[in-house]
Image: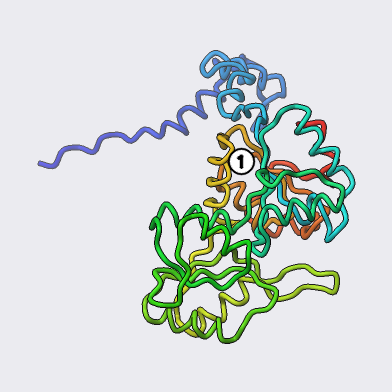
Amino acid sequence: MPKPARPVVFAGVAAFGFCRHPRFWGPKEYEGNTLKSHTADKLEAMMDATFGTKEEREKEITPVMKPIKYWLTDMDGVLVHETKAIPGAAEFLQALRDKGREYLVLTNNSVFTPRDLSARLEASGLEVPEERIWTSALATASFLKTQSPKSSAYVVGEAGLTTALYQAGYVMTSTNPEYVVLGETRSYSFDQIATAVQLISKGAKFIATNPDKTGPTKDGPIPATGAVAAMITAATGKNPYFIGKPNPVMFRTGLNKIGAHSEETAMIGDRMETDMLAGVESGLHTFLVLTGSTHREHITDFSYRPNEVVDSIADIIARV
């Protein structure tokens, strides 16, 4: 004979019924389907007794941010617009020096060497030593040095990129290079792009310094590395590995340079799609400034958020 079915107990329903029972609440502490408001105090007391106080519960689930000891900041749109310093930038940099903070100025620009960029910032009234500047070219050279030391590359780019690769021990050649490295240049040559396409088609690995499709000028945007990379991809079917922002490799190599830890580091940037994305993925405390590419009303278009949104870098000086 089949065994009789066991009774099923719906714990949630039973508990709900128990909670509504007059023996639990008292003879007149509920009316119909509505509990009187003071019964919430008893619920809170039960929660406190079982799980700890509200403050203790919130403390357990709220991450505790360590003090910011290290700083990464973007350059264009945060410190400068073209040749003009953004108000508050000089004071922010001075605060970093006064407090002895380790910091780096990050840029996806691969055209110029750190010395060139330091001179450019100085002309804008900002003091940033060249050793405090970390470019996508330097990050690319650092990455390739760890991947394939003393190898070879065909390079489309300018002094910022070729110098970084040379210092990393790379030989630059168009004869069977292991890599094709695409950077930014002020005058892309069709012959160079054609050579890059041919070498990649023959098996060279495709690296690009950054995915930025346009770059800013006083006359408006111009095509940048990402746009040229898309053309090469269309011709070869090969996608590049981008090193610069938003790739966290750019940040990790920078953090290693100054001996920083992500949980104690902040990133200041003006682009949601690069600066903030890389900061979020690297576990940094992120500040979005509204002096560059991103407007406040566009922040909600993205599925991630910066930790803080401020009008300009002047609002961060007190945080150093």
- Residue nearest the viewer, comparing 283 with 97: 97
Locate the N terminus and report the quarter of the image it occupies: top left
> In terms of image quadrants, where is residue 92?
top right
Q: Which residue is rendered at x = 51% and y = 69% of the image?
A: 181
> In terms of image quadrants, where is residue 58?
top right
Locate the C terminus and report the quarter of the image it occupies: top right
For label 1, the crowd category at 10 Å Cα-Cα, with few meaning under 14, some 14 to 19 and many 20 or more, is many
Residue 73: where, in percent of width, then height?
Answer: 71, 46
Q: Name the residue that disc number 1 marks.
A: 284
Q: Which residue is rendered at x = 44% and y = 54% of the image?
A: 145
Q: Which residue is rendered at x = 77% and y = 58% of the image?
A: 294
Q: Amino acid at mark 1?
A: Leu
- Residue nearest the viewer, comparing 21 with 185: 185
* Lateral position of residue 219 relative to residue 168, left or right: right
Residue 208: where, in percent of width, then height?
Answer: 54, 67
Residue 98: where, in percent of width, then height?
Answer: 78, 28
Q: Is residue 165 above or below residue 220?
A: above
* Lateral position of residue 103 relative to residue 85, left or right: left
Q: Is residue 245 above or below residue 54?
A: below
Q: Is residue 17 above or below residue 196?
A: above
* Residue 85 appears in view: yes
Residue 184: where, in percent of width, then height?
Answer: 64, 69
Q: Which residue is rendered at x = 49% and y = 79% of the image?
A: 196
- Residue nearest the viewer, comparing 170 with 217: 170
Q: How is the image coloured?
A: rainbow
* Residue 306 appears in view: no
* Lateral position of residue 58 relative to residue 8, left or right: right
